[in-house]
Amino acid sequence: MNALGWREWAALPEIGVPALRAKIDTGARTSAINARGIEPFDRGGKPWVRFTLRPDRRRAEDIVCAASVTDVRVVKDSGGHAEERYVIETPLRIGERPEAWSVEITLADRAGMQFAMLVGRTAIRRRFVVDPGRSFMTGKPASPVAAGAAS
């Protein structure tokens, strides 16, 4: 089985995110991403959401993303506070690995957190083991961004 460190580079190519630093968190069931300015809308009679993401709070530009909404659910954060969040499903790539797989991600205000994305255990189950003493074991994604991701 492949190994990950406690933090890795991740890409969400279908929604236009080429690379961001993500915390691998086996204590969290669901993955989460820092979404600001969340705007629900309809596309073809289906619920969608548009949001802004800053992959790196120190130097990256904001990315406007759009994705179909698969669910709205109550999620407890690490402090035990429950909040209702939109859930999207999109392919995830870790590091330089070529394969991507579909994962559920909740949209959350992670502005005060060090990482824009938290990868929960369901996203990596049966794919990876985590070495908590290592970081960035898989390299940085070099994937092209999907054209028109926020349209």
Image: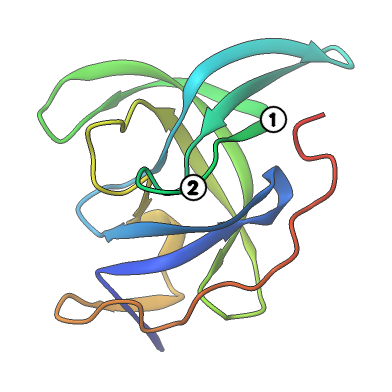
Q: Nearer the viewer, residue 142 or 101?
A: 142
What is the residue that sits farthest to the left in this orientation? Answer: 79
Q: Secondary structure at mark 2?
A: loop
Q: Nearer the viewer, residue 130 or 137?
A: 137
Q: Nearer the viewer, residue 32 or 114?
A: 114
Q: Secondary structure at mark 1?
A: strand
Vertical placement of residue 106 versus 5, above or below: above
**Image quadrant where one finds the N terminus:** bottom left
Q: Residues within 10 Å of mark 2 (few under 14, many from 20)?
A: few
Q: Residue sitting at 66 percent across and 75 percent down?
A: 99
**Image quadrant where one finds the C terminus:** top right
Q: Quadrant of residue 42?
A: top right
Q: Which mark is residue 138?
A: none
Going by the numbered disc 2, the residue's amino acid type is: Ala
Q: Which residue is mark 2?
A: 60
Q: Residue sitting at 21 percent across and 30 percent down?
A: 77
Q: Which of pointers 2 and 1 indicates the residue nearer the eye?
A: 2
Q: Residue sitting at 69 percent across and 69 percent down?
A: 143
Going by the numbered disc 1, the residue's amino acid type is: Ala
Q: Which residue is mark 1?
A: 66
What is the residue that sits farthest to the front in this orientation? Answer: 59
Q: Position of residue 142 (x, y in %)?
A: 64, 73
Q: Position of residue 132 (x, y in %)?
A: 17, 75
Q: Position of residue 45 (x, y in %)?
A: 85, 12
